[in-house]
Image (spheres, rainbow, N blue to C red):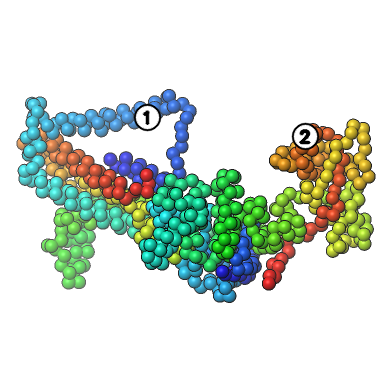
């Protein structure tokens, strides 16, 4: 999902820049050979597991067809886990998306020295992959119950605990933001670069302010990509496991599934299939919503 | 209608001098082209006028007022870019209406004006199409209509046709001129295409290395280039190297032949090496019968190449005074073949000597 979305975002920038797909005439008959390994890989590691997962979600341990696995995910603690997963993913995608967009814009501003960009890209590339135990540790050490920032704030008279916690929606989304927003910057920079200088200048020439440009041209033009990237961030957060695990959050779908894999939940192994199936359903629904929004916002691209 | 004066504009980018004290006056309602090779500073000058770029020193005076202090969006100038400048998320009509929308004009007035302008550029039928659904030429028409919608004081065009096919380019440049004349709008047009500049301008400013090398009507520029640069950049020139034989009578010997320079200001000492120029259309040739010798006033040459240019054919010649190009009617050229002997004559009244070095020539205008 992540790969295809990134590819899609890249494609859309091409469209903005006005480039056309190149025609491939030579060696068309054998050209497919090159992609065989890729499809083989997809088949073995994506299609087969997914198929097994879906079958597993609808069969008993003895192999008989059943709806009872699916029915079980509507019982505690699973609905709460789904709810928290969706909320956390959506919130961190929203924050990350907006902040990443603003920062990518700021980095590309013509007043910013040139060397800032590669430095920022390197930092973002690193930060986007800073997840799991080290990230959880970093936040526990700063904003945890006994973290330095928490204590500092306490000295200043702001006691953020117990209303705040790194396991709550706000706290956890703040931690997730740390890898969401650099990822957004990385993916948003090419999109913003796709906004042609001529558009800004033409708008200004016709009397528009910078705000006018963004309102009438900039935002409408980047909206399809912006939506696509926020969906990507949603998926990124939705499937995150290590960070949540290290933070000690238990009511997430991925953590619940993890308990089956770790053997900590031996009572109903088929429930893991049903939970994973539920995740797929939610991702599919997200993509459908995205497609509808996208279609509305990109009529001019057709 | 407005007048525009570029005063002593200087702009450097690091060590690159993009504009070297450029001066240019454009009269009210006039169509002036800046013509010059790539990198000579045309775009920089135009962008300074539009407000997207600032000079290190100098002034841009519109209707007697220096506009350098005004931001681009307050200058009320119409700009047409080279390509891809239409807002992709808006239809042709919405693009044309944009400037009026910014000016908070009513829906009806905007729509009326947009349809008038799209009519003017011949695109009334495409008003609800998005830029992606328009050809390059159509996009430029919409861009022109969009820039005219705000009734700009000045119309600025930066190589607006250079991304188009040859045929569309010729057609569109004539339309740009027709519309300009119809509206009487003061226009500054940038191009590196001499034919384009000569065919549609009231006056042409030939630019080189950040300054105006010569300013004049197309006819003046073509038939009276004042520097070697202008002569070579506008049209094609033959260069003859010679030695002054008589200072008073302006006789120059180019190898075995002698010519008289018609220009009375040609003052050089006897024995001085000079360069003379003549256009290919001022070089006449006649087929020499085998074994024949050229008549008086003619000298011998041999055909080295034939380039068909439509009504005329450009003939490459090897002569005693060096390689020459001659334009002859294509019907006549049918009788020529490579290595054919020909008699060559220079139209002496068209010979000119030019300053090789550029000189400052911002001709004062009324
Ligand atoms: N933003 C810029 N930064 C650095 N050099 C520039 C910039 N803009 C123009 N130049 C330089 O200034 C000179 C004139 O450029 P330009 O005005 O674009 O020429 P033209 O439009 O006649 O081709 C060129 O040498 C170009 O490289
Ligand atoms: Mg240019």
| Image location (x, y in percent) of residue B359 | 73, 64
Q: Chain of mark 1?
A: A
Q: Nearer the viewer, residue A73 or B244?
A: B244
Find residue A288 and report its image quarter. top left
Could you say whether the residue bearing mark 2 is in a helix, strand or loop? loop
Query: For the residues marked 2 and 1, what is the alpha-carbon distance in whole angstroms?
Result: 59 Å
**Residue at the top extreme?**
A29
Residue B276 position, x and y percent, is: 82, 53
Residue A293 shows up from this direction: yes
Residue placed under numbered mark 1 in the picture: A35
Which residue corresponds to the image point at 62% horizontal and 67% vertical from the top-left? B26
Density class for disc 1 (Cα within 10 Å; few <14, some 14-19, many ≥20) is few
Q: Is residue A122 visible?
A: no
Chain letter, disc 2 residue: B
A97 vs B22, left or right, is left
| SS of the residue under disc 1 | helix
Q: Nearer the viewer, residue A205 or B126?
A: B126
Residue B311 placement: quadrant: top right
């Amino acid at each position: 999902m992540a790969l295809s979305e990134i590819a899609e975002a890249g494609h859309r920038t091409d469209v903005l820049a006005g480039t056309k797909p190149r025609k491939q005439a030579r060696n068309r008959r054998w050209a497919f050979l090159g992609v065989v390994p890729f499809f083989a890989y997809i088949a073995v590691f994506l299609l087969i597991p997914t198929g097994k997962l879906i079958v597993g979600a609808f069969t008993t341990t003895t192999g008989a067809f059943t709806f009872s696995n699916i029915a079980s995910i509507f019982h505690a603690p699973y609905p709460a886990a789904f709810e928290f997963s969706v909320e956390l993913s959506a919130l961190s995608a929203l924050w990350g998306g907006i902040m990443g967009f603003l920062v990518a814009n700021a980095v590309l501003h013509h007043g910013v020295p040139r060397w800032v960009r590669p430095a920022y890209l390197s930092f973002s590339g690193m930060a986007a992959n800073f997840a799991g135990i080290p990230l959880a540790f970093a936040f526990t050490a700063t904003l945890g119950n006994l973290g330095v920032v928490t204590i500092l704030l306490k000295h200043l008279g702001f006691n953020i605990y117990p209303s705040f916690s790194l396991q709550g929606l706000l706290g956890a989304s703040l931690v997730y933001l740390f890898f969401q927003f650099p990822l957004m910057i990385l993916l948003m920079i090419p999109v913003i670069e796709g906004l042609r200088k001529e558009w800004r200048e033409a708008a200004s020439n016709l009397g528009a302010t910078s705000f006018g440009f963004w309102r009438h041209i900039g935002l409408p033009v980047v909206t399809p990509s912006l939506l696509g990237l926020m969906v990507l961030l949603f998926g990124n957060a939705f499937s995150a496991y290590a960070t949540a695990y290290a933070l000690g959050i238990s009511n997430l779908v991925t953590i619940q599934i993890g308990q089956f894999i770790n053997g900590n939940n031996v009572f109903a192994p088929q429930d893991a299939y049903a939970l994973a199936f539920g995740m797929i359903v939610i991702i599919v629904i997200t993509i459908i919503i995205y497609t509808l929004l996208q279609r509305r916002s990109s009529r001019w691209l057709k | 209608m407005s007048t525009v004066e570029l005063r002593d504009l200087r702009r450097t980018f690091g060590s690159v001098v993009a504009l070297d004290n450029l001066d240019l006056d454009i009269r009210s309602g006039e169509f002036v082209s800046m013509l010059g090779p790539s990198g000579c500073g045309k775009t920089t000058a135009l962008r300074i006028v539009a407000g997207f770029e600032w000079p290190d020193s100098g002034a841009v005076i519109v209707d007697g007022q220096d506009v350098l202090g005004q931001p681009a969006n307050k200058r009320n100038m119409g700009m047409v870019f080279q390509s891809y400048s239409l807002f992709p998320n808006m239809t042709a009509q919405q693009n044309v209406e944009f400037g009026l929308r910014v000016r908070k004009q009513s829906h009806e007035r905007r729509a009326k004006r947009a349809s008038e302008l799209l009519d003017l550029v011949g695109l009334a039928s495409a008003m609800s199409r998005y830029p992606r659904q328009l050809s390059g030429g159509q996009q430029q028409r919409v861009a022109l209509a969009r820039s005219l919608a705000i009734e700009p004081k000045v119309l600025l065009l930066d190589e607006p046709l250079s991304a188009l096919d040859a045929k569309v380019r010729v057609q569109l440049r004539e339309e740009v001129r027709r519309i300009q004349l119809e509206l009487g709008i003061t226009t500054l047009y940038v191009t590196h295409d001499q034919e384009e500049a000569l065919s549609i301008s009231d006056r042409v400013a030939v630019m080189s290395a950040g300054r105006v090398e010569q300013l004049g009507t197309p006819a003046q520029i073509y038939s009276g280039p004042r520097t070697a640069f202008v002569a070579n950049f506008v049209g094609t020139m033959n260069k003859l190297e010679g030695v002054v034989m008589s200072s008073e009578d302006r006789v120059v010997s180019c190898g075995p032949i002698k010519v008289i320079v018609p220009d009375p200001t040609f003052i050089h000492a006897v024995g001085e090496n000079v360069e003379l120029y003549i256009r290919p259309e001022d070089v006449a040739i006649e087929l020499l019968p085998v074994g024949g010798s050229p008549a008086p006033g003619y000298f011998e040459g041999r055909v080295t190449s034939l380039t068909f240019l439509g009504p005329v054919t450009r003939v490459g010649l090897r002569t005693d005074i060096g390689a020459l190009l001659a334009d002859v009617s294509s019907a006549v050229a049918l009788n020529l073949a490579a290595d054919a002997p020909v008699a060559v004559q220079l139209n002496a009244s068209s010979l000119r000597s030019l300053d090789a070095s550029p000189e400052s020539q911002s001709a004062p205008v009324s």
